[in-house]
Structure formats: C-alpha cells, structure tokens
Image: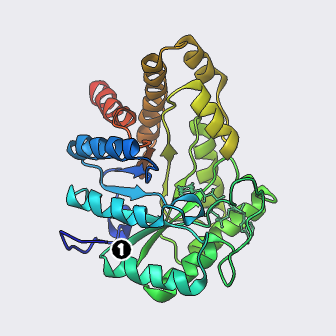
C-alpha cells in the first residue's frame, strides 16, 4: 500500500470512553467492479463534509479483496476521514500470515481493527479454520493483542443472535470472552427494531460486559434487498417496514426514501436513549448517510 500522507491514527478507546457526544461511523466495502469503485469514490468525496468520527472498511469474504481493503483504507485517509479502521477476518490466513498482516496494519499507522472470524465460504454452512489458522474472533483478538497490545479492537455482537449460536447464554459468555481477551468495543449486526438492541445491551450488562456497544444500522434500499440481508443475518424484518416499502412499489427512489426514513426514526430514538454512537452500513452510497443528518435535524427541532 502506498502511503501518500503518513500518519498514525489515534486508538479509538479514549474517544469511546468520553461521553460528551455520540460517535458517528460509516462502513465502506471494497467494490468488485470499476463502476463500483467510481461509486465508492463519489461517496467518499460526497461524505467528507458530514465529519464521521471514524470509518471502517470491510474485509472481503474469503479474504478475496484483502489488498483492496487496505487500498481503500489509504484512500479514505487521503480525504482526512479521521481514524480508519480496517476489518480483519480469520478466513484464508494461517497464524503466521495473520501476524504479518497485523504488523503491516501497525506499520501503516492504523491503530484500530474490527476483529472478526468471517463467514464460511459460499455454499458451506460450517466455518472450517484454515490450516494452522484461527477458529474464531476471540482467538484473533488474542493474536492481535499479543502482537501489538496498543491496538484498539472492535468485535461483532448480535442483538438477535448469530445463526450459529448454540444458545443465547453460550453466545453471551463467548462475547464476554472476546472482551476479556482485550476487545475495546462491540459493533452490532444490523437490527431494524430498536428493542432488540436495548434488550441485548441489558443482557450484556447483566453478563458483566461494560464496553461501549455501538448500534449498527442499515437503511433499507428496497424490499428485495432488505429481505435478502435480514434472511442472511437473521435480523427481524418488521411488518410495518415491509408495508412502507411495498407502498413505495416499483419506484427505487421512493423505496430508498422509505428505508432512510425508517432508519432516521431508529436513530432519533437511539440518540434520545443516550447510545455511545451510531455505526451506519451505508453500502458505499451517500444517501443512506442522510438518515443521521435527518435525525440530527429532528432532534434539534424538538429540543
Ligand atoms: C460489525 C460487523 C462487521 C463485519 N465485517 C465483516 C467483514 O469485514 N468481512 C466479513 O467477511 N464478514 C464480516 N462480518 C460478518 C461476520 O464475519 C459473520 O457474522 C461471521 O459469521 C461471524 O464473525 P464473528 O467475528 O462474529 O465470529 P465469532 O465471534 O468468532 O463467532 C460467531 C458466533 O459463533 C458462535 N461462537 C463462535 N465461537 C464460539 C465459542 N467458542 N463458544 C460459543 N459460541 C461460539 C457465537 O454465537 C458467535 O456469536 C461482519 C459482521 C459484523 C456484525
């Protein structure tokens, strides 16, 4: 990765510990086509003025877009986006390779990593660790902390349960073990009903998990898209949102507006409840980020 603007990010843990205002973060993903790359660049340019506190870049399934993750992270840096947090998964790498990647991330000046196991390859239901690799995100947290103790690490949490969870309690115990290994915060899987998040936070607190839990939100772009995603990740698709998206019919703009409005309502409520931040899965587009700006406007008007 070429580094045109050498810099060393601040670990986010201090910023997360400060409670003066909630953080805003966006998630980008490495596109697979040239058109996708142009759309991403447009979004990156168009969103600078919204001043997110940090941004993250996903790690391609199967590690396929691994280098692209770092290229996009470098691109985001050029736009002075603040701390850029690459995601890293256990997929496709041995321990030795993960050590090398960890060193590279450190040397490039990144200090924050979203630490994940990753999904099984397409068509497979079970995650099989790579040869001499790691089986779960907890082990990756351990590896990264052993390599560079100063890394600030985020891990995934699942308000409605991970599809592979044996039970709600075993999942919670396991989540706590990721924190006990040194993870600094949790970002949740997307949810479309805030009660799922509030219940999850309560259960985490009861289990002794005290790190910040950032709600992850995704504005629906269309009924088909949100159906696909919720089916994949096991999140509940509220009938009221389905009704609104059906009402938008075949108009992509109207459907996206309905999705953004729903997400805006979620954000207003979450901010009123004092969440530590909002993480937006913006799908490399500008409009989904509007849900946060709209929520701010609503809150200012009602203050
Ligand atoms: C915020 C966020 C960002 C993501 N970014 C990416 C990305 O960039 N690239 C990508 O490929 N995927 C990404 N994903 C998807 C993620 O890789 C999948 O959800 C994957 O199936 C699980 O990853 P994990 O890190 O949660 O795994 P883990 O935390 O290792 O485990 C997943 C689940 O399996 C069960 N489990 C695992 N080990 C144990 C154990 N020892 N004991 C009990 N239960 C256990 C638990 O139910 C646990 O919640 C992301 C998900 C989220 C929420």
Residue 124 falls left or right of residue 254 = right
Q: Residue furthest left?
A: 5
Query: Considering depth in this image, is 61 or 210 the residue closer to the camera?
Result: 61
Q: Residue furthest right?
A: 166
State how many labels appear. 1
Residue at position x 72%, y 62% from top?
Answer: 171
Image: 170 above or below 233: below
Quadrant location of residue 106?
A: bottom left
Query: Considering depth in this image, is 223 or 214 the residue closer to the camera?
Result: 223
Rendered location of residue 301, percent (x, y): 28, 25
According to the image, label 1 marks what residue? Answer: 111
Image: 285 above or below 137: above
Rendered location of residue 207, percent (x, y): 66, 64
Image: 301 above or below 139: above
- Label 1: few (<14), some or many (≥20) within 10 Å? many
Residue at position x 62%, y 74% from top?
Answer: 138
Residue 83 visible to an observer of this rendering:
no
Quadrant location of residue 272?
A: top left
Rendered location of residue 208, percent (x, y): 62, 67
Query: Considering depth in this image, is 100 or 36 the residue closer to the camera?
Result: 36
Q: Quadrant of ligand 1?
A: bottom right
Rendered location of residue 113, percent (x, y): 44, 69
Residue 174 visible to an observer of this rendering:
yes
Residue at position x 38%, y 41% from top?
Answer: 35
Residue 206 falls left or right of residue 258 = right
Image: 192 above or below 92: above
Considering the image in quadrants, where does the N terminus appear? Answer: bottom left
Per the image, label 1 sits on a secondary structure element best described as loop
Residue at position x 61%, y 16% from top?
Answer: 243
Considering the image in quadrants, where does the C terminus appear? Answer: top left
Colour theme: rainbow
């Amino acid at each position: 990765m070429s580094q045109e603007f050498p810099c060393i990010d601040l670990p986010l843990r201090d910023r997360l510990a400060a409670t003066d205002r909630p953080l805003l973060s966006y998630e980008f993903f490495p596109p697979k086509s040239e058109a996708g790359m142009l759309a991403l660049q447009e979004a990156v340019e168009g969103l600078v003025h919204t001043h997110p506190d940090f941004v993250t870049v996903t790690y391609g399934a199967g590690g396929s877009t691994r280098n692209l993750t770092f290229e996009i992270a470098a691109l985001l840096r050029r736009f002075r986006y603040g701390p850029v947090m690459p995601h890293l998964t256990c997929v496709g790498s041995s321990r030795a390779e993960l050590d090398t990647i960890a060193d590279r991330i450190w040397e490039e000046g990144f200090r924050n990593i979203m630490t994940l196991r990753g999904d099984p390859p397409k068509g497979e239901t079970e995650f099989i660790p790579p040869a001499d690799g790691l089986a779960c995100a907890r082990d990756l947290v351990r590896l990264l902390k052993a390599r560079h103790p100063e890394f600030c690490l985020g891990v995934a949490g699942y308000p409605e349960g991970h599809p592979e969870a044996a039970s709600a309690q075993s999942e919670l115990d396991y989540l706590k073990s990721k924190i006990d290994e040194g993870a600094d915060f949790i970002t949740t899987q997307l949810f479309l009903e805030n009660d799922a998040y509030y219940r999850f936070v309560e259960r985490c607190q009861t289990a002794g998990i005290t790190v910040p839990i950032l709600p992850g939100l995704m504005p629906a772009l269309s009924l088909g898209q949100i159906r696909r995603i919720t089916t994949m990740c096991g999140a509940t698709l509220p009938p009221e949102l389905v009704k609104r998206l059906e009402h938008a019919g075949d108009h992509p703009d109207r459907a996206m507006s309905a999705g953004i409005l729903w997400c805006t309502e979620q954000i207003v409520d979450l901010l009123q409840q004092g969440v530590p931040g909002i993480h937006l899965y913006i799908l490399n587009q500008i409009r989904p980020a509007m849900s946060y700006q709209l929520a701010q406007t609503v809150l200012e008007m009602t203050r």
